[in-house]
Amino acid sequence: MSRDAQGPEEYVPTGDEDRLAARLAEITEEEAEARAAALRAGLQDYELDDADAALLEDAEDDAAGLPYVPAPPVLAIVGRPNVGKSTLVNRIIRSREAVVEDVPGVTRDRVSYPAEWNGRDFTLVDTGGWEADAKGIHKRVAEQAELAVDEADAVIFVLDGLVGATAVDEAVVKMLRRKKKPVLLAANKIDSSAQMSEVYPLWNLGLGEPYPVSALHGTGTGDLLDAALKLLPETAQHGGLVPLGGPRRVALVGRPNVGKSSLLNKLAGAERVVVDNVAGTTRDPVDELVTLGGEEWRFVDTAGIRRRQHMASGSEYYAMLRTQRALDKAEVAVVLLAVDEPVSEQDIRIVQMALDAGRALVLAYNKWDLLDEERRYYLEREIERDLAHVAWAPRVNVSAMTGWHKDKLAPALSRSLENWEQRIPTGRLNAFLGELVAAHPHPVRGGKQPRILFGTQPATRPPKFVLFTTGFLDPGYRRFITRRLRETFDFTGTPIEVQMRVREKRKRR
């Protein structure tokens, strides 16, 4: 198997230029299909298994345009630091998505998760701890929590039921009254009926009935959600329309402090994500719907990858896992690199993570407006040396600080995704292989020359090709085929995978 990556040296053909594109242009679709049918029929002379037969069914993708549906309603979780908001979020979404650690202030941004209860879909928003008169980064965290309330259709206010209402809790109540949103009061950490006496004084906050819950054990969360659904409208008041299946998903990845959050804020046109000069400010993946190039995209700003996974600890370790999960859920990755620093091992590793996940790829070079001629010279050399294996990825030069060239991202994303989903008709693929091999046959090895019997593309997202052969193709020759596939069919922006299946002739009885 060969996925675009650094590997053995590519086969270098000898002789004149093969004029492959011109020769393919002369072959009609009917001729190509007839050739492919003859080649496929010839496979009956070879030993094939059930998996081969399934591959040869050649399922074409007939997906039509997706209809648009209203966005689901939004339920925000707010409260002071360390009252168990993220634990409650994990309980509601039935997953350990939100970063949880036994220190206050682990969650810093507002983070959205799809959720469902009793057959109704809604969006759950986790927020950082709200503090009155906060300073520095804590002030920006509090601002994000308030913005979450502004955009929510209803709010769950969480406090520590065993501690009771503190001065900070009362300040949160004042903030919520100003917002005039429906609010439910959740008294967390109530694990037994013996602790119910701690809950009754919370009526004095004037938010109605307090719901005793244990986010850790799940007690009372069903009653809380039943009440929340009664407050939520059928669709989001601020959500608009989203495609059925959701907008295209973009993972924004890169090492810490390269400007991921700044770029997301500039794309969103708002201070959506907490930005601070301290590397690693973002710990949770932060979803944001962004309109770019007249189309809606779902961007995920992921935690900066600081060091190898086994060297990380605590919330940073879990944030790294979530970065990988964000890549797994995304369709296209934007890898952000800072041009004022040399391309690092971390940068290369993050690019490889995107490739290993099989995602479409765009490389965005940040701080380009600060680049001088000397640094530009060395940067180009670094790119040629360290990123040659992804030379096929669209390259966008941007400034996260000023928004310069941000409009160039949408065409790059669209092109990468289009090629990520591209399927080459079987006839055209085999015409390509036939003309290529005729011009540049595989070298003879040990007196034998392997032949390509038939080629098919069983998958897209990313494109995967399988070649049925009479013998093992040299890795360098497979890399040569991969490069010519790219040049001929334009697979800009996507990894492509070329596998082979060596099959022997059936023995005559």
Image (cartoon, rainbow, N blue to C red):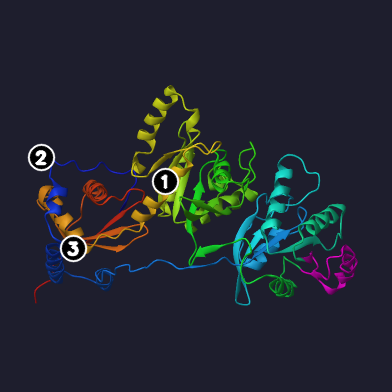
Q: Position of residue 497 (x, y in %)?
A: 31, 55
Question: Mark 1 = which residue?
Answer: 362
Q: Quadrant of the C terminus?
A: bottom left
Q: Residues within 10 Å of mark 1 (few under 14, many from 20)?
A: many
**Disc 2/disc 1 C-alpha distance (Å):** 34 Å
Q: Looking at the image, do the residues carrying marks 1 and 3 touch, with CB atoms under 8 Å apart?
A: no
471, above or below 384, in the image: below
Query: Please, what is the three-letter code of the amino acid marked with disc 1?
Result: Val
Q: Looking at the image, do the residues carrying marks 3 and 2 touch, with CB atoms under 8 Å apart?
A: no
Query: Please, what is the three-letter code of the amino acid marked with disc 2?
Result: Asp
Q: Residues within 10 Å of mark 3 (few under 14, many from 20)?
A: many
Q: Quadrant of residue 49?
A: bottom left
Mark linked to residue 370: none
Q: Upstream in the sequence, badge 2 or badge 1?
A: 2
Q: Is residue 92 left or right of residue 340?
A: right
User: Which secondary structure lies at badge 1?
Assistant: strand
Q: Quadrant of residue 134?
A: top right
Residue that appears at 41% across and 54% down: 359
Mark linked to residue 427: 3
Question: Mark 2 = which residue?
Answer: 16
Q: Position of residue 25 (x, y in %)?
A: 15, 53
Q: Is residue 141 left or right of residue 258?
A: right
In the image, which residues are magenta?
184-213
Q: Position of residue 325 (x, y in %)?
A: 52, 56
Q: How many marks?
A: 3
7, above or below 188, in the image: above
Q: Is residue 119 left or right of residue 447?
A: right
Q: Residues within 10 Å of mark 2 (few under 14, many from 20)?
A: few
Residue that appears at 68% across and 73% down: 229
